[in-house]
Image (spheres, rainbow, N blue to C red):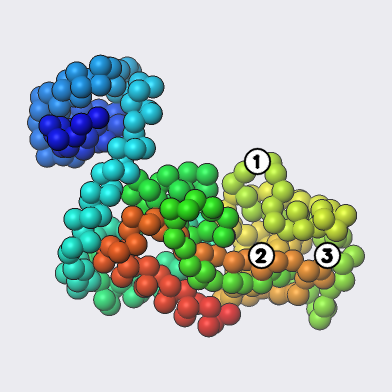
Amino acid sequence: MNLSNKDLNLFVVFDVIYKEKNLTKAGQVLGITQPAVSNALSRLREEFKDQLFVRTSKGMIPTPVAQNMIDDIRQALELIRSSITDSETFNPKTARNTFKISIGDTSEYRLLPELIKQLTKSAPDVDIESYLTPRSETPKELATGNIDFAIDPPIHTDSNLRHQKIYEDEYVLIISKKHPIASKKTISLDDYLNLGHMHISKRPIGLGHVDMTLSKLGLTRRIALRAQHFLVAPYILDKSKLAITSIKSFARGRDLKVFKLPFDIESLILHLYWHGNKDQDPANIWMRDLIMSTYGKIQEKN
């Protein structure tokens, strides 16, 4: 396609319609009227010889042509925004940026209190949005700018992503101090396997890191409770004889008993991910340096 005679603002409109699924809402986001959005959509339809969006009871639904275009359009728009930002400076004292981080709940528990503490001092008007992106979607979400960072184990192989190790923690067994075996100094493999275990996962089925490790040893444990969020775990431990195998820092600040595991298991390792198109972005550099230094302080407490 020859872009020399194209209005690139049309692609901005395309992106917002795709996201909002409503022409009036798209106009509000863009700061233009609904007729202006409709006019832009008409020009896009003429250009691509396709309806692009079909009006339904669920809103403006993209056609297959629009679905095939969206990733490339968002990545191109992000590159344009990034190239403009690269020439700018970032002053945390006056910045009003919002950084979006894909992060799990236990990592939120570790990172966010310290990160917000630092932001309150050095960048009072900088905001954070934290939510978990499916790992299969992470490279695309980083590429399109829907998220700025992801904190994950080192599993992503997309060559366009940049990453840095930021955290490591060992797995331990955690129980209530009222548990019948809490008086022991160490536990045996039989002790471990005879316990009822709590497993935290948002997936309804499938083995986690601990169970895959046990499986390789020809062992299984009884999962007495499968729950979605780590937040509930301390309360369940307090009111039951269940145990949880989690990272050591999970027990910090809580009145819980911690045992070294009676089998070898790889530690949890976390990396900070960002996209290569943000590598030289001053705001991105500042925030990732802050995240890394904050995790460094957390690591020192382990």
Q: Is residue 110 visible?
A: no
> Picture coordinates of residue 161 (x, y %)?
44, 55
Q: At 30% from the left edge and 31% from the top edge, which residue is drawn?
A: 18
Identify the residue under disc 1. 204
Quadrant in the picture for the N terminus = top left
The extreme right residue here reads 190
* Secondary structure of the residue carrying numbered label 1: loop
Q: Quadrant of residue 276?
A: bottom left
Quadrant in the picture for the C terminus = bottom right
Marks 3 and 1 sit apart, C-alpha to C-alpha, by: 24 Å
Residue 296 lies left or right of residue 277; in this view the side is right
Amino acid at pointer 1:
Pro
The numbered mark, 1 or 2, whose residue comes first in the sequence reads 1
Amino acid at pointer 2:
Ser
The numbered mark, 3 or 1, whose residue comes first in the sequence reads 3
Q: Nearer the viewer, residue 45 or 301?
A: 45
Amino acid at pointer 3:
Tyr
Residue 283 lies left or right of residue 288; in this view the side is left
> Picture coordinates of residue 19 (x, y %)?
30, 35
Q: Quadrant of residue 2?
A: top left
Q: At 32% from the left edge and 68% from the top edge, which residue is drawn?
A: 285
Q: Quick one: label 2, few (<14), some, or many (20+) residues within 10 Å?
A: many
Q: Is residue 219 above or below residue 263?
A: above
Identify the residue under disc 2. 246
